[in-house]
Image: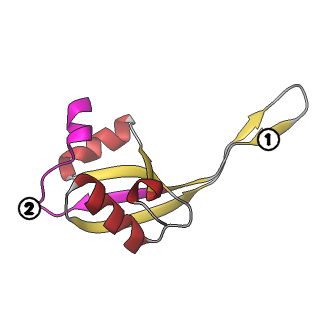
């Protein structure tokens, strides 16, 4: 992975993820090959915060119908739940949405 913007693809903005913002937890879609150490350094570099803990999940693609009898699956992706240290500032991108 060359750049931190290649690791952190985009934030996940849902009602459930916005409830976690108060506890300084943020949810991102990340590159499938990224490890927790790579994700931690990328988030710290992109947003200027200190990361305390990271949980990752591989999300399976969902089945979608495409026509009468055929169907396919959406792309699989990786999700990272990032918890910041209590002393670090919050991420401004999420604060502007709330």
Side (left or right) of 66 relative to 34: right
Say if residue 98 shows up in the picture.
no
Residue 96 is situated, as x and y percent measured from the top left of the image, at: 21, 32
Residue 34 is situated, as x and y percent measured from the top left of the image, at: 49, 67
Q: Which residue is mark 1?
A: 72
Classify residue 66 by image quadrant: top right
Bounds of the magenta span? 79-98
Residue 97 is situated, as x and y percent measured from the top left of the image, at: 26, 31
Sort mark 2 into few (<14), some (14-19) or many (20+) by Cα contacts within 10 Å. few
Q: Which mark is residue 87?
A: 2
Q: CA distance from mark 1 to mark 2?
A: 45 Å
Residue nearest the observer in this picture, 33 or 52: 33
Is 26 within the magenta? no
Side (left or right) of 45 relative to 29: left
Does 11 appear above or below 83?
above
The residue at 83%/37% (across/down) is 71
């Amino acid at each position: 992975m060359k750049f931190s913007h290649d690791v952190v693809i985009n934030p996940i903005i849902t009602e459930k993820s916005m409830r976690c913002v108060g506890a300084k937890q943020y949810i991102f879609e990340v590159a499938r090959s990224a490890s927790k150490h790579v994700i931690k350094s990328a988030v710290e570099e992109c947003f200027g915060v200190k990361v305390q803990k990271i949980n990752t999940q591989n999300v399976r693609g969902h089945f979608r119908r495409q026509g009468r009898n055929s169907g396919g699956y959406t792309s699989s992706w990786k999700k990272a739940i990032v918890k910041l240290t209590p002393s670090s500032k919050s991420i401004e991108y999420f604060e502007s949405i709330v």
